[in-house]
């Protein structure tokens, strides 16, 4: 039995969907199941340039992180400029996550400029790579912030591994 809500194929004797928990009605005929699957496919492929719930939640996480990065940078907990750069990167990741039409505008412009296709459409690869790109931008923002944080507060002792014969190949702390 195919769920009307999520499209998961359940056992014919199931009363509720194992995937989303929606209650299942009577068993569907082949034609009804095909209509449900077609409707779910239409909903999924209806507008690939619309932000998903994951994209919207990610945007708020990125924007909140940007505020934290910026405030800690202004309070000088992070090396000067690193907090601001991390905040700008986090905001950029949030914009890419929330507004896929902006990225598609530039990508489709490049496609029209360098190919003969005049009306390109986003494919699944583009959709996945957009998600990968904003996650990588946010990872870069966190890396810049952490680098600035650790550069501001150096460690008390340095861990040194020596490979010179004069120092007996030892490990020491300074």
Image (cartoon, rainbow, N blue to C red):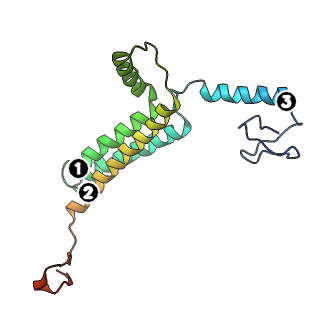
Q: Secondary structure at mark 1?
A: helix
Q: Residues within 10 Å of mark 1 (few under 14, many from 20)?
A: many
Whether residue 157 is visible, yes or no, is: no
Figure check: 30 above or below 68: above
In the image, taking residue 48 as reference, residue 170 lies left or right, namely left
Circles 1 and 2: CB atoms closer than 8 Å? yes
The residue closer to the viewer here, 153 or 42, is 42
In the image, taking residue 50 as reference, residue 154 lies left or right, namely left
Whether residue 87 is visible, yes or no, is: yes
In the image, taking residue 160 as reference, residue 118 lies left or right, namely right
Query: Residue most toward the bottom?
Result: 168
Instruction: List the residue tagged with mark 1.
Output: 82
Image quadrant for the N terminus? top right
Which tag, 1 or 2, sits closer to the chain's start? Answer: 1
Instruction: List the residue tagged with mark 2.
Output: 147
Q: Nearer the observer, disc 2 or disc 3?
A: 3
Instruction: List the residue tagged with mark 3.
Output: 30
Which tag, 2 or 3, sits closer to the chain's start? Answer: 3
In percent of width and height, residue 144 lies at 28, 51
Look at 35% across and 39% down and name the residue there.
91
Look at 44% across and 40% down and name the residue there.
59
Q: Residues within 10 Å of mark 2 (few under 14, many from 20)?
A: some
Circles 1 and 3: CB atoms closer than 8 Å? no
């Amino acid at each position: 039995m195919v769920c009307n809500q999520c499209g998961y194929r359940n056992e014919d004797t199931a009363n509720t969907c194992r995937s989303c928990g929606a209650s299942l009605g009577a068993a569907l005929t082949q034609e009804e199941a095909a209509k449900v699957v077609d409707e779910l496919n239409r909903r999924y492929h209806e507008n690939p340039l619309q932000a998903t719930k994951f994209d919207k939640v990610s945007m708020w996480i990125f924007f909140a992180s940007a505020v934290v990065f910026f405030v800690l940078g202004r309070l000088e907990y992070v090396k000067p400029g690193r907090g601001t750069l991390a905040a700008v990167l986090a905001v950029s990741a949030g914009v890419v996550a929330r507004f896929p039409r902006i990225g598609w505008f530039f990508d489709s412009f490049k496609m029209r400029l360098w190919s003969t296709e005049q009306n390109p459409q986003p494919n699944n690869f583009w959709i996945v790579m957009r998600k990968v790109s904003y996650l990588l931008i946010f990872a870069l923002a966190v890396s810049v912030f952490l680098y600035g944080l650790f550069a501001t507060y150096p460690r008390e002792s340095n861990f040194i591994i020596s490979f010179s014969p004069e120092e007996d190949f030892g490990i020491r702390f300074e």
